[in-house]
Amino acid sequence: MDLSTFPRIPLGTWPSPLDDCPRLSATLGATVLVKRDDVNGLGLGGNKLRKLEFTLAAALAAGADTIITFGGVQTNHGRLTAAACARLGLRCELVLTRDVPLTGFAYDRSGNVALDRLFGARVHVCDTDEEAAYTAGALATASSVTLPVGGSSGLGVLGYVAAAQELREQLDGRRIDRIVCGSGSGGTVAGLAIGADIPITAVSVSRDAEGTLGKIEAAAGLAAEELGIDEPKLHHVDVDDSALGDGYGLPTDEVWSALRLFARTEGIVLDPVYTGKAAAALVTGVRPGETVVFVHTGGVPAVYGYAPDFVVEAGR
Ligand SMILES: Cc1ncc(COP(=O)(O)O)c(C=O)c1O
């Protein structure tokens, strides 16, 4: 698929590494490769950089001087939008909603939200989606561009179409059984599914399997419009909501164990909201002898937002 006609601004360092993980693999009885989209350069890294390369290029081409976007208090998309805006000399307005029933100094002030401020973004914390919509509307000007939650516009999804192409080149013909990747706003899995005909397990982090598939289909549809192709068939996407627990932003015991497993076998840090849930689903669903690419989508600064629990769980 030719993406060269779309404006794109380099923000990350590509290709991100594809790490062999022998000790993790031996523990799970399968071959696990980790695609390190957590270590891709800007703003402490993460999957949103790939989307921002396309969405911010389009915003700049449209003459924007300000980016407005949304998320929860510990949004990684907000943090990376703030970092990219700093790099590009754009103003950044982050409209955050208290959508996780957690509070306290660490959650409300540390982790991603502290980094948002460090990168110079203005942070507006709202109690409801209605308040967030009103706040964003009041901030909008003729020269601002508003990006959706998770950056999953049609253009944003193209970032993961490109990632799938990058992964195929790294695999260089090596056969894998499936990709495992966390899914929230759906854009990451949608892009991977459009870019590679490899089975994908999309691990729900915020809604049940049906709701997650709906998000992925919607994001894929938006990308298809940008690409001028037919609505993509997502027959190779399977949604696993077994690690969802009590909902978005609420880690389970299995999530904390997955963080310890990756850290203690490979020195890889996962986050408790996205990659921790994706890894928990990998651990419970792994089939003996299979070869899996686990996409590490980033999110690691959130561990500081979960400091009280993280401190205890890290030491178990
Ligand atoms: C660290 C991390 N992983 C995974 C995701 C999920 O990606 P998507 O929203 O494209 O489904 C997000 C989105 O917020 C994220 O921040």
Image (cartoon, rainbow, N blue to C red):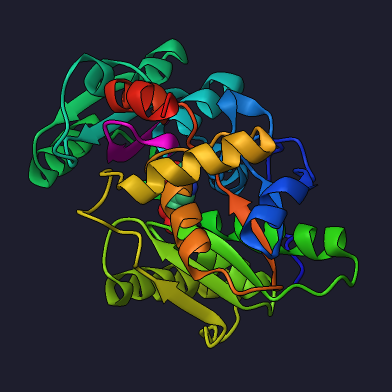
Give me the residue at 85% from left, 58% from top.
170
Q: Nearer the viewer, residue 315 or 178?
A: 315
Q: Is residue 7 visible?
A: no
Quarter of the figure that contains the C terminus: top left
**Quadrant of the rendered image containing residue 159:** bottom right
**Above or below, comparing residue 297 to residue 280 in the picture:** above
Residue 137 position, x and y percent, is: 19, 39
**Above or below, comparing residue 285 to residue 53 in the picture:** below
**Quadrant of the rendered image containing residue 129:** top left
Q: Residue furthest right?
A: 172
In the rendered view, does 77 fall on the left or right side of 73? right
Look at the image and say whether residue 66 sits in the magenta stretch.
yes
Residue 183 position, x and y percent, is: 43, 59
Residue 303 position, x and y percent, is: 41, 27
Q: Which residues are magenta?
A: 65-76
In the rendered view, does 85 fall on the left or right side of 158? left
Q: Is residue 264 visible?
A: yes
Give me the residue at 57% from left, 26% from top.
44
Look at the image and say whether residue 132 sits in the magenta stretch.
no
Give me the residue at 53% from left, 19% from top.
86
Count of numbered labels shown in the rendering: 0
Residue 110 position, x and y percent, is: 33, 16
Quarter of the figure that contains the N terminus: bottom right
In the rendered view, does 10 fall on the left or right side of 118? right
Give me the residue at 30% from left, 47% from top.
252
In the rendered view, does 30 fall on the left or right side of 185? right
**Above or below, comparing residue 77 to residue 168 in the picture:** above
